[in-house]
Image (cartoon, helix red, strand yellow):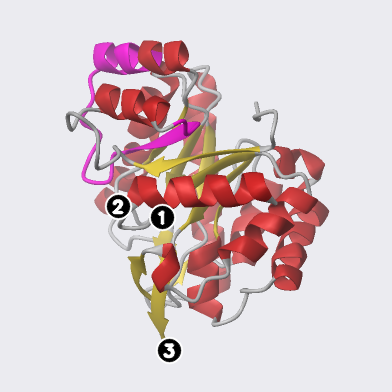
Amino acid sequence: MTSKEGLLFGTAGIPQSSKALTTQSGIERIHELELGCMEVEFVQGVRMSPQSARDVGNVAARRGIKLSAHAPYFINLNAQELEKMAASQERIIQTARITSLFGGESVVFHPAFYLKDEPSKVYATVKKNLEQIVAKLRAEGNRVWIRPEVMGKGSQFGTLEEILQLSAEIEGVAPALDFAHWHARTGKANSYNEFIAILRKVENKLGRRALDNMHIHLSGISYGPKGENKHVDLPESDFKYEELLRALKDWKVGGNVICESPNLEKDAQLLQQTYRKL
């Protein structure tokens, strides 16, 4: 599902101007702001009952807001301890179950750390874990997309190539493209031509369908030699978001753009307004 204009814009979590710090109130505020989507943040744990999830889904359906979710931060699919590995799998599965109940289509998560392992070994471990997660969810009839995120630090598993390869090899896995993370990690990837090259990689690896159903994270970002330091507001960063939006529009990309800037809804509106003017 994509909007008629290609992309929907929204916030990572409840807008700061929401009347109450509840997911339902956040959805109502997204609607008032004339944005189109919201990512439900379960970053500290999946604390939503099945009934609450259904209620959230009813509000989102009534307001026409598309939902997704971010799984807890405490995930490492390359954990050395078996209990930590099992807990990481379970956090993704729990998030997907609740997301399905509120009608969300995607679960985003930070996949792993390299620790001291070779990237190829980590890739094989992450792939095996993701295959097990997807198999369990599909056995339950859960069709939510599982989306490992492109990460912003060199210590984190999640290069663009790794995420696209996982998405190509495992049915039910799709990329969460964080363009700010990739810019911070590489020190590059910050021009129209570079953004087009990324979109071309996605299409070559995953087909046009992937571009029609993207899940994108955007924010301003500060970074150093080791990659990402922190998210900052878009106008304060060197990230060329207008060039990215132009690339997305020229390639007729569809899906969700989730703003993670500290000034959540203001920057989400800035992105939407800029996109519509192009």
Residue at image coords 65%, 29%: 3
Residue at 82% from the left image edge and 55% from the top image edge: 204
Relative image position of residue 174 (x, y in whole percent): 61, 44
Instruction: Please name the residue that numbered disc 1 is placed on.
Output: 110
Query: Where does the magenta region start and end?
Result: 34-57
Residue 25 sits in quarter: top left
Residue 197 against residue 146 in the figure, above or below = below
> What residue does disc 3 label?
225
**How far apart in space, not on screen, are marks 2 and 1 (Cα)?**
7 Å
Spatial distance from mark 3 to mark 1, Cα to Cα? 21 Å
Q: Can residue 152 be seen in this view?
A: yes
Q: How crowded is mark 1: few (under 14 residues within 10 Å), some or many (20 or more)?
A: many
Tell me: residue 20, above or below residue 156: above
In the image, what residue type sits under mark 1?
A: His
Residue at the spot of label 2: 73
Count the labels in the image: 3
Residue 31, compared with residue 172, is above or below; it is above
- Is mark 2 in CB contact (under 8 Å) with mark 1? yes
Disc 3 crowd, CA 10 A, few/some/many (<14, 14-19, 20+): few
Of marks 2 and 3, the one in the foreground: 3
Report the amino acid beneath label 2. Tyr
Residues at circles 2 and 3 in contact by the CB criterion of under 8 Å? no
| Figure quadrant of residue 255 | top right
The front one of 96 and 257 is: 257
- Judged left or right of residue 264, residue 278 is right
Residue that protrudes farthest toward the left in the picture: 20
